[in-house]
Image (tube, grey):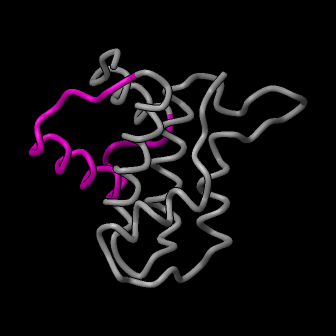
Amino acid sequence: MTAFLSVEQVIAFHDEHSDAPLRDRGRLEAAVMRPQAEFGGVFAHPTLWAQAAALLHGIDRAQAFADGNKRTAWTSVVVFLAANGFALRLSQQEMFAFMKDVGSGAAGDVPEIALWLFEHAVPA
């Protein structure tokens, strides 16, 4: 069974690195719940990688905090994957470049982000 994050956990991740206020709790809730979305009892994002990508993409796009959205998205996906038995193996430079691409849209959408995460993951 997949271990999902709560909105309160994501807020705590953000607050560890920033005092910027939460601007829109509703947008954050939607982003954090996105990996758990179901239609007819079937996950909209059926793999762990798609769920991780939906979480990362959702938090980054929601811009729910006044600052620190990319850091929060990255921390959230790292913790989500760790809770589900995986770690990401990459340099800090690769992570910064990837998150810049996520923010600009150059990394693509959920399927492309999911593939990137899968390619950089190792069992924890």
With 45 as the anchor, is 37 left or right in this view?
right
Q: Is residue 100 magenta?
A: yes
Residue 90, quarter of picture: top left
Q: Where residue 95 sits: x, y (%)?
A: 20, 44
> Residue 81's quadrant in the figure?
top left
Residue 14, above or below 37: below
Magenta span? 86-110
Q: Is residue 97 left or right of residue 102?
A: left
Q: Is residue 88 above or below residue 24?
A: above
Name the image quarter holding the N terminus.
top right
Q: Position of residue 27 (x, y in %)?
A: 62, 68
Task: Identify which residue, 36 or 105, lies in the foreground.
Answer: 36
Q: Is residue 8 magenta?
A: no
Query: Residue 23: x, y in percent?
Result: 53, 83
Q: Quadrant of the C terminus?
A: top left
Q: Name the residue at the right extreme.
A: 40
**Left or right relative to 36: residue 50:** left
Q: Residue furthest top?
A: 123
Observer-nearest of 56 and 15: 15
Q: Residue at x 12, y 44 (%)?
A: 92
